[in-house]
Structure formats: C-alpha cells, structure tokens
Image (cartoon, rainbow, N blue to C red):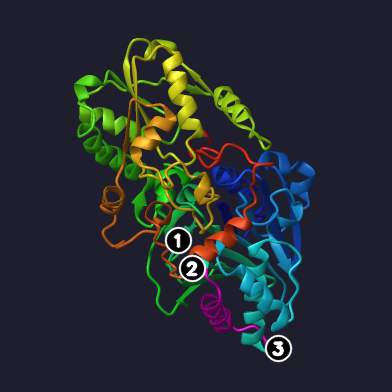
Amino acid sequence: MCGIVGVVSNAPVNQLIYDALLLLQHRGQDAAGIVTQQERKFFMHKAKGMVKDVFRTRNMRALPGNCGLGQVRYPTAGNAFSEEEAQPFYVNAPFGIVLVHNGNLTNAHALKAELFNTDHRHINTESDSEVLLNVLAHELDQATRGNAFQLQNIFDAVRQVHRRVRGSYAVIALIAGHGVLAFRDPFGIRPLCIGRNKDNVMLASESVVMEGSGHAFERDVLPGEAVFVDLQGKITAQQCADNPRLNPCIFEYVYLARPDSVMDGISVYQARMNLGAALAKRVVSTVPPSQIDVVIPIPESSRPSATQLAHLLGIPYREGFVKNRYIGRTFIMPGQVVRQKSVRQKLNVIGSEFKGRNVLLVDDSIVRGTTSQEIVQMARDAGANKVYMASAAPPVRFPNVYGIDMPTSSELVAHNRSVEEIRKLIGADELIYQDVEGMKQAIGLLNPKIKSFDASCFDGVYVTGDIGAADIQRLNANRVSGDENEEDTSRLALPNPQEE
C-alpha cells in the first residue's frame, strides 16, 4: 500500500506536493519521493524515511517547476531496505517518463521476462513499479513509432498496458514536456481521484488530500480510465479497458484509508460506523448486553465502529487505552517476547476503566493475533472481570495479493482455525467477528452502484481471476518481510490513519 499524488499548476509545486504527502503519510512510512519538471528537465529527491525526515530545505529548493509527482511507500514486494526501490521511477525514452504507483502486479515475474526477451528493456530492481513503468514506456513507444506526440497515443498505450498487466495499480506518470497521465486498473482495486482549484489540477490516492490542500474534490478516476492533464491544466479522459468494473478493496474502508476520506462515493468514516452497527447485531447474539459494562476501542481506527456499537446497545463507551504516538516502528522483532514488549510500549491502559468490569474490546480487524492476545492480557492485568473481543471485520483467512503486506496463510491466526480456537488462542472470554456478507452489505449500502468489492483476504475470491495456490506461493516468496526483519503485523504493522 502506498500513497501517490500528481500536480499540474501555474506556480511552483514542490511545497504543495510535500504537503500532500504529509496528508498521505498513513499510506506509507518506509520511503518518500518527489519529482518535478522545469523546461523538460526532471528534478528528483527520494530516500527512506518519513516525509518530514526525507525532505530538508536544501532538497526542496532543488525541486523547481510547475508540475510534479510524489509518493510515500509501504513496500509489499521487493527489497524494503533499498533506497533504489523508493519511487518515483524514471526512464528516458520515449520522451522521458517518471512514474509513481500504488498497488501490486500479480504477473510481474512474467512481464519482467517479456520486457527482457521481447521488448529489450532492462529492469534493475525487484520493484514491480519499475516493471509497470517499462511496460508503459514500451507501449507508448510502440504507439508513437518515432512520430510526434499525439494525445491519442497516450490512451492507446494505456489500453495495451491494461491488456498486459494483471493485479492492482493506481498510477500517475509525468511525461517530459507534455503533462501528467493517471490511470487505474480495470477493477478499480486501488483508489485514485481528481481535484482542482483555480491554479492547480491534482490527482491523489485519497480525497482528504484535496480538502487538506485547498482543492475541490471533483471525482474518482474510473476503473480502467486514463486521465491526461496537459501543462496548461486541460483534462482529457478516455476509457481504456475492455471490460472495466468497479471492485474497490474493502480493506481500505475497514482500516487503510483515513476516516475523513471519501472513496468511490463512500465515506470511510460512515463505512466504519455502519460496520459497528452490523457488529452490534452479532454481539447481541453472542453476549447479552446486560453482561457488558463498557465498550472500549483498540486505538485508533476502530473508534467509529465502537462508538456506534456502544450507542446501539446502550452501553457506556470509554477510552481504556492510550496510544504513544511517538514510538517509532520496530523493524527488527525476531521473537514473540519482543513483539509483546512492543505492544506494551505503544499502548497503556487506564486501569479505572477495566477494574472489576466486564469489558467489550472492539478492534477493526484481527490479522496475526499477537496484538489481540497481548491486549486481552493487558485488560486482565488491569483488573477486568471478563474480557470480550469483537472485530469489525470478518476473520482474515487468506493472503492479500493486491498491495497490502498481509502475512502468508500460515501466519494468519484465522487460517484453518475455528472462531472458538482463535478465542482460546487470544485468551478472550468471548470472540465475536463480523460476517463477510454483513461487512459487504454495511459498506455497500453507502453506494448502491458498487456491486462487488475485492474482499479476497476475507473470502478468498481474487477479483482479477488469475490467482491460484501457486501464484500465492510465488508472491509470498517475494514479500519484503520475513522473521528476521518483520515487525508485528497482527495489525498489518501499518501506521494508523487517525494518528496523522
């Protein structure tokens, strides 16, 4: 999962892109990069780290120009520790192209071989984003065939990209001397939207970037659609996919996106409220509300669901955990003891909210279960009489292959385990999960035009239709994290949207 932004303006864009990346920081904290263009020359700076650490005054001064791109990276494939894999990526022909990408290509290995053997292009990193850039560059070269740039060439090239590439991809590319191109995969798995004000046209992963930077949100880029913004800010769009259909990633609404964003016509905050309402019905069927003294969220993104659940059940809502926002990410956590220590460093209990009470803890999701187990124990240590756990999302039983660093099947606490087995493992007195159909209905009600979601980590249905057991095994082998360098991914080890 990454955050991307592109801007065409009549004024310098370096500060604007920097500010946009701060608003997207929750989508990636491993690396950040900005590229700008002035007089057909690209100026780029990228490095590992958070936005505020990557860009200093001297770096910003070295990024002139009225159009540019930016990206914050959370790697899911390739080498997480290589600055070479930070984005944007660049190729010098045709024209000169730089690209930022959010998503994950499921056929990158096959494309890499095609690029080398047939297209005669060299890939120098393990990043699928570099593969995608070279596919785009090759197809644009084929479309122009050495002739002068024509707008239709862009759309013809994207059409061929869609035919060759599989997986999820939201892309923004800057073509030297011509403008900014954005496109989204034919299933619209990863988000991308357009906004503008009197000076700028902006493209970004989430609508919160528009609102937070003084732009009016205009619309989402459609699945399979390509949008080109020339250097004067004129927008031209064309559908380039043969059979587009919208299947947005449902985990964006559950956890990934900021609550103040609207994606494909759905308010993320309202989606989480609806999940809480649906979860309330599940709780009632398992634990009588009279046996619950207090509802306590696991900070941060479970709060809307917990608030709505408590309201509907008529149970007091309390904050029982305080999150230390200044604890950095722990990159080397080789054992269970270290993982448990990390949880207690990041969360502290307010003992008075637990002592002698039956508490219902609400989390947005349970992935590995390590954090849930430790939090349940923390509640007991604080004096809770009984500890019930509820998840606003269903059991995560399958790996994600579309750009979320979801653990392998063997690492998922719900894989090949019943709810009762998971309950015993995490030590809760009761464990209540959302059901898959309830989740889809709760979120889908907010935009009836969306007929289906990518919910593959919950239901095992991979919407691109090209994923089998062998593909998952191969993709898992290329994951960036492993036991020797992995932090606690029970909650995906992602920065929390509500912290930003």
Residue 39: give x, y in percent of width and height.
75, 67
For the point 61% across and 49% down, the residue is 74
Dot 3 and dot 2 residues touching (CB under 8 Å): no
- The front one of 180 and 490 is 490
Residue on which the image places disc 2: 185
For the point 62% across and 50% down, the residue is 72
Mark 2 nearby-residue class (10 Å; few <14, some 14–19, many ≥20): many
From the viewer's perspective, is 101 left or right of 168?
Answer: right
From the viewer's perspective, is 420 left or right of 493?
Answer: left
| Magenta residue check for 152 | yes
Residue on which the image places disc 3: 146
Mark 3 nearby-residue class (10 Å; few <14, some 14–19, many ≥20): few
- The front one of 66 and 347 is 347
Residue on which the image places disc 1: 189
Magenta-drawn segment: 147-166
Q: Is residue 64 above or below residue 304?
A: below
Could you say whether the residue bearing mark 1 is in a helix, strand or loop? loop
Q: Is residue 6 above or below residue 230?
A: above
> Which is closer to the viewer, label 1 or label 3?
1
